[in-house]
Amino acid sequence: MEHKLDARGLSCPEPVIITKKAIEKDKLENFTILVDAHVAVENITRFVKSKGYNIIVSESEGEYSLTISK
Amino acid sequence: MNSKLKMFISGGVIGLVGVVLLILGNPGNMGLCIACFWRDITGALGLHRAGVVQYIRPEIIGIIFGSAIMAFIGGDFKSKGGSSPFVRFVLGFFLMIGALVFLGCPLRMIFRLANGDLNALIGLFGYVSGIFIGIQFLKKGYSLGKSIEQSQIAKYIMPIFGLVLLIFLVIRPAFILFSTEGPGSMAAPVIAALVGGLIVGALLQRTRICTAGGFRDLMLIKDTHFLFGLLGIFVFALAGNLIFNFDSFNLGFANQPIAHTNHLWNFLGMALVGLCSSLLGGCPIRQTVLASQGDSDAGITVLGLVMGAAFSHNFGLASSGAGPTSNGQIAVIIGLVVVSIIGYAVTRKSQLKVK
């Protein structure tokens, strides 16, 4: 089952905290997270890369879908 | 370029702008201070009557325009808001009270430290402690909720406010107050301050540097990305002061410009600033930048800062070189209690939702 998280509209650093929880607590290896700000994309990208995960970013109408995988 | 080096150099440019503005006439160790500058604007608008701190600081106008223009180019200029605005207002309000008890925002804290003022080191300990407490709330689920898209007009409010301030600054109508003595009368030339603000605003918008974010990310996710920006501000400001401004460099606690040596209240004032900043998701500079790129929640936070500045000077909460006032001490305690209750209540609500 693919996990989809929604961090749209949340202010800094909540999108990163949600991602951190998904990786460290829920031990997810493949999931998608939705955000709506450049800064969240940058922060999450930096964080997951430091954890050794891959990330693919796709944008549509000002919203970003980040596909994160081990 | 390595991203940390990029942050370090961007921070360095901000540090140098601060040094240049200091040399050109800004008040002592106040090349840039977002809290002090909003406070001066609050005074110029007559919302407080402390005659020595009233001036329309062009740096703020520059930061508003620099951020807005850069956000427009980068696609970040968007109307959004609706994430607990009144709570943010209260957090902004108490943030300013804490900053004016310490005598400076986190940015001025770095500039003070870079000119030898060790009281700022005590402030830094307080600031980091406040952020640490804020992180504990964040880890337990603290969230001010989602913002949503707002009416298109919303994103123009802050730039238009900047324009209005610029008009007041140039025309100097009688109802706008300008200090003739004290820190409010000390200022770099308008054009230099505007250009400095534009550069700083553009850099801050693009790099997302935030003084709270730097320490928060270090503690929360062991990431030093933003911290390198802060380090850049400090190192370049220190080098700039030592090379170009050596007369003003004074290592120690005593006789520092626009500062006091009361360690407890320097610590607690900045602890309140750190706690508010981490619960808001950004320090006063970051809030000013976000407000300029269309974030109404940050705009409300800035109004909270302005209201906090007005109360601080109307009710004698702000410190002076002589030290903190008793009213200021009471206000910081009230602030720490109220902001902790907000943190607890918001966290508890989100935990109940999960169950």
Image: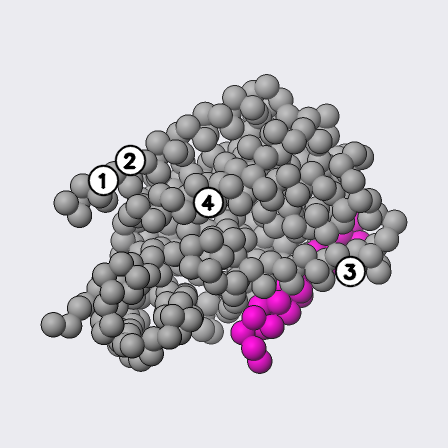
- Residue B132 got which mark? 4
x%, y% of residue B172? 65, 45
- Residue B240 got which mark? 3
B215 vs B44: above or below: below
**Quadrant housing the N terminus of chain B:** bottom right
Which mark is nearer the camera, 1 or 3? 1
x%, y% of residue B14? 65, 61
Q: Nearer the viewer, residue B174 or B237?
A: B237
Q: Which residues are magenta?
A: B1-25
Residue at (52%, 53%) from the top-left corner? B215
The amino acid beneath tag 1 is Lys
Q: Tell me which numbered mark, 2 or 3, is placed earlier along the sequence.
A: 3
3D distance between C-alphas at marks 1 and 2: 6 Å
For label 2, the crowd category at 10 Å Cα-Cα, with few meaning under 14, some 14 to 19 and many 20 or more, is some
Residue B47 located left or right of residue B255:
left
Residue at (77%, 60%) from the top-left corner? B239
Mark 2 and mark 3 in contact? Answer it, CB < 8 Å. Answer: no
Residue B297 located left or right of residue B322:
left
Tags 1 and 2 both on a single chain: yes
Residue B7, magenta (yes or no): yes
Residue A40, magenta (yes or no): no
The chain identifier of the residue carrying mark 1 reads B
Please name the residue that numbered disc 2 is placed on: B345
Q: Tell me which numbered mark, 1 or 4, is placed earlier along the sequence.
A: 4
Mark 1 and mark 2 in contact? Answer it, CB < 8 Å. Answer: yes
x%, y% of residue B92? 45, 40
The amino acid beneath tag 2 is Ala
- Residue B349 got which mark? 1
Mark 3 and mark 4 in contact? Answer it, CB < 8 Å. Answer: no
